[in-house]
Amino acid sequence: MINIIPLTGLPEIRPGQDIAALLACKLPVSLEPDDILIVTQKVISKAEGRFVKLGEVTPSEKAVNLAAIVKKDARLVELVLRESSDIVRAVPHVLITRHKLGHVMANAGIDSSNIGDGDSDTVLLLPEDPDKSALKIASAIAEICGVRPAVVVSDSFGRPWRMGVTAVAIGVAGMPALIDQRGNLDRNGRTMEVTQIAIGDSVASAANLVMGEGAEGIPAAILRGLTISKPSQGVTALLRSAEEDLFR
């Protein structure tokens, strides 16, 4: 049976804080082998100091022109361009880009909600390397607790063709992000040709049921009871290349 156990009572995270030590102090249960620790991108970005004040951003001509199309603050649009490798969609009130990390997402993942008691001029960027962040947390918690959990860094994405947001993995350590079942047989003996399981996303989404999207203040959870006998693999495995994007 799978259990999802929330970590509650964490303080507001500040730049430079040891996020692994803070999480270890708030573990509601002793870690067990095969436990997966899911941590929201936001608290990792805060600890890594990924804050930017819009007042310190000078928009380029390209950002100003694009801001007029999407009807957004030109300073925010400038940050989005800096964090992105490509513009996917730009229409009034919508700016979808391919982030430098490879994720296709709104506003390059830049957010201003639930980022603490800073002024309204402050926004938060994604971690520079979420896989590396996940690995660092896993290693530090192993030293503190004596058990090394797998770690998933989660973020909330909208999806084409469906309403609402759901949590996905943007960083993974200690478990596979994707399980490829192509070539295996189904229960009727047929060879599966396309089945790949986005296990990192499934774990992130499951944990989000207890972590929430609003004012819950639960930035981490333990998922227990899922045994994955596959090698560790970073989140790059989940990213569809631009060449394979058939819907642009």
Image (cartoon, rainbow, N blue to C red):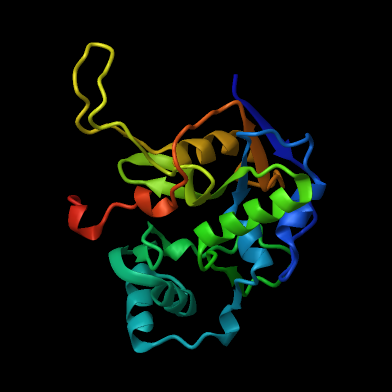
Q: What residue lies at 21% left-to-right and 14% top-to-bottom? A: 189
- Left or right, residue 4 beside residue 108: right
Between 70 and 89, the one lying in front of the other is 89
Task: Identify the image quadrant of residue 54.
Answer: bottom right
Q: In this figure, what is the number of numbered marks? A: 0
Task: Identify the image quadrant of residue 96.
Answer: bottom left
The answer to whether 206 is drawn above or below residue 57 in the figure is above
Residue 59, position in %: x, y? 44, 85
- Left or right, residue 137 beside residue 176: right
Kindly tell me whether residue 248 is visible in this rendering. Answer: no
Task: Identify the image quadrant of residue 120.
Answer: bottom right
Residue 65, position in %: x, y? 32, 81
The answer to whether 136 is drawn above or below residue 36 in the figure is below
Which image quadrant: the N terminus? top right
The answer to whether 241 is drawn above or below residue 162 in the figure is below
Between 196 and 111, the one lying in front of the other is 196
Q: What residue lies at 39% left-to-right and 41% top-to-bottom? A: 178
- Left or right, residue 182 beside residue 22: left
Residue 142, position in %: x, y? 70, 49
Q: What residue lies at 50% left-to-right and 42% top-to-bottom? A: 175
Which image quadrant: the C terminus? bottom left
Kindly tell me whether residue 227 is visible in this rendering. Answer: yes
Between 219 and 62, the one lying in front of the other is 219
Residue 84, position in %: x, y? 38, 70
- Left or right, residue 185 beside residue 114: left
Between 4 and 84, the one lying in front of the other is 4
The answer to whether 127 is drawn above or below residue 41 in the figure is below
